Amino acid sequence: MSRNKQNLTLPVKLDAKTLKNFATFDNMQRKKLWKMPVTQGSMLLIGGLICAMLGGLSGPVPFITFAFLFLGAAIIILYFFTFAGYVRQMVKKADSENDGSTFNLSVSDTGMSISTNKKYYNFVWSEMDEVYRANDAMYVYADKGAFIIPQGEDPKTMDAIWERFTEKMDPKRIADIRKNK
């Protein structure tokens, strides 16, 4: 890392654990995508329990009870299995696209830039929507997508980058989500 008053530059390499943590945070905490399937599944489970309590064991009631209970549990279980598959696929895709090289992150008074051997992204502070600081990385959401900045070897560098984000961005758009600060 090179550090001066103007720029903080950090070579960054993503690993599978960081990608998994990001996917879990993005889908479960930030977007809360789990709420819909869990709510729908819970409603079917409750409907199945009500059928079982009120209907007894005669006629079509046991079939309806079983269908509600089965579908309620299946919706919830399938969502989490699908999510786990999505994470595995995302990590596999990132591994295949990553040739072992790092990308360079530079944070300055005007914004942030990220460069790889194929692409270059440059953001001014107003183009960054949200920034989250997790234990192992920072997640930067901007107009052009989400970017993961892993902790790396030197935590002081991450602290300096986080300090720059807190200075330049609206406090409502940044959050420290570290568990053990």
Image (cartoon, grey):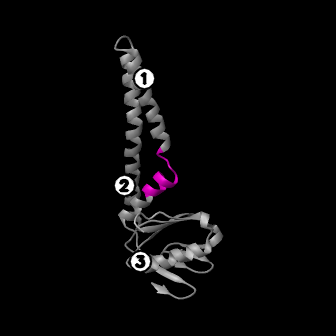
Inspect this view and state whether residue 59 appears: yes
Q: Distance from label 2 to label 3 (Cα)?
A: 28 Å
What secondary structure is marked by label 3?
Answer: helix
State the extent of the magenta-drawn residues as a range: 23-34
What secondary structure prevails in the magenta region?
helix
Q: Is residue 172 above or below residue 62?
A: below
Which numbered disc, 2 or 3, marks the residue that appears first in the sequence? 2
Q: Is residue 57 above or below residue 73?
A: above
Which numbered disc, 3 or 1, marks the residue that appears first in the sequence? 1
**Residue under label 2:** 88
- The numbered mark at residue 50 is 1
Which residue is more in the foreground, 57 or 24? 57
Kindly indicate whether the residue at mark 3 contacts the one at mark 2 (C-beta within 8 angstroms). no
Image quarter hosting the N terminus: bottom left
Image quarter hosting the C terminus: bottom left
Could you say where residue 109 lies in the image, as x and y percent from the top left?
61, 80
Left or right: 33 in relation to 45? right
**Residue under label 3:** 155
Q: Distance from label 2 to label 1 (Cα)?
A: 38 Å
Type of amino acid under label 1? Ile
User: Does the magenta run of residues contain 67?
Assistant: no
Residue drawn 39% across the image and 20% down it: 53
**Mark in the foreground, 3 or 1:** 1
What secondary structure is marked by label 2?
Answer: helix
Which numbered disc, 2 or 1, marks the residue that appears first in the sequence? 1
- The numbered mark at residue 69 is none
Kindly indicate whether the residue at mark 1 contacts the one at mark 3 (C-beta within 8 angstroms). no
Type of amino acid under label 3? Pro
